[in-house]
Amino acid sequence: DGGITQSPKYLFRKEGQNVTLSCEQNLNHDAMYWYRQDPGQGLRLIYYSQIVNDFQKGDIAEGYSVSREKKESFPLTVTSAQKNPTAFYLCASSTPTGLTDTQYFGPGTRLTVL
Amino acid sequence: EDQVTQSPEALRLQEGESSSLNCSYTVSGLRGLFWYRQDPGKGPEFLFTLYSAGEEKEKERLKATLTKKESFLHITAPKPEDSATYLCAVLAGGYQKVTFGTGTKLQVIP
């Protein structure tokens, strides 16, 4: 089955720790994205990558880092510099079709800081 | 700056009671408007992409329409399983950045 997988589903972090969220896709999509979702707010873009070994900051990149060493994988590290990391994190991927790209989402990872 | 506003924030319907959700947008150079369905604790599920004013798309009890300023998601004779949060998003200009609305939480009561 083609799709996007995220792991783990739930993640607990102690203050001061870095944690890495996994995102893998087998859709052969070129672009991948990380969003953060908080109650009452729209999805906010953290980072995105249009090709391997290249990525751009989104609206709320501070305290986060990413890598794109393989087309299929786009891991997100939440560093200790992120002041309020408790949130639902969503990974998405897309590939250009005509004038636009439709993004498809993974199941999400819920991160809680203890 | 691109803006997307969804209304109402929450909607409660009786089973079979048709209604519409609204997505108003302010963008420069719309390239696509997207509708997603999101169940609690899950990732958004893609429903529709609309590209230009006047376009309509349908899927089961859902029909999405687009004008130059807004999009509507019409729900005909909804069932309890249609209960979810419906998200609207736009892609505009020369960038890859998609702007999302805050969603409409729909509850369909048997």
Image (cartoon, helix red, strand yellow):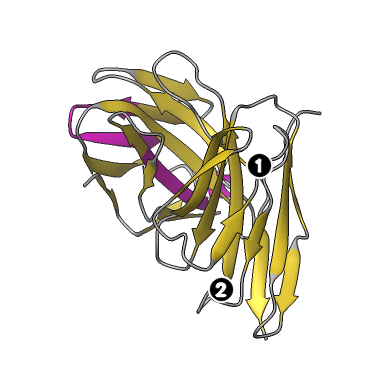
In the image, B90: left or right of A90?
A: left
Question: Closer to the N terminus: mark 2 or mark 1?
Answer: 1
Q: Residues within 10 Å of mark 2 (few under 14, many from 20)?
A: some
State the image quarter where residue A77 is shown. bottom right
Q: Residue A56 has which mark?
A: none
Q: Nearer the viewer, mark 2 or mark 1?
A: 1
Q: Position of residue B34 (x, y in %)?
A: 41, 34
Q: Residue furthest right?
A: A1
In the image, A110: left or right of A36?
A: right
Q: Name the residue type under label 1.
A: Arg
Q: Position of residue B72 (x, y in %)?
A: 31, 35
Q: Residue furthest front?
A: A53
In the image, B38: left or right of B88?
A: right
C-alpha distance separating marks 2 and 1: 22 Å
- Residues A94 and B83: in front is A94
Confirm or deny contact between disc 2 and disc 1 (CB under 8 A): no
Secondary element at image label 1: loop
Q: Which residue is mark 1?
A: A68
Examine the rendering and report whether any part of residue A14 can be seen. yes
Secondary element at image label 2: loop
Q: Residue at x 23, y 42 (%)?
A: B24
- Do the residues indicated by labels 2 and 1 lie within the same chain of the protein? yes
Q: Name the residue type under label 2.
A: Pro
Q: Position of residue B11 (x, y in %)?
A: 38, 56
Examine the rendering and report whether any part of residue B77 can be seen. no
Q: Which residue is mark 2?
A: A85
Identify the chain of the residue marked 1, using the numbered disc in the image: A
Q: Give the residues in magenta.
A: B65-89
Q: Residue furthest top?
A: A98
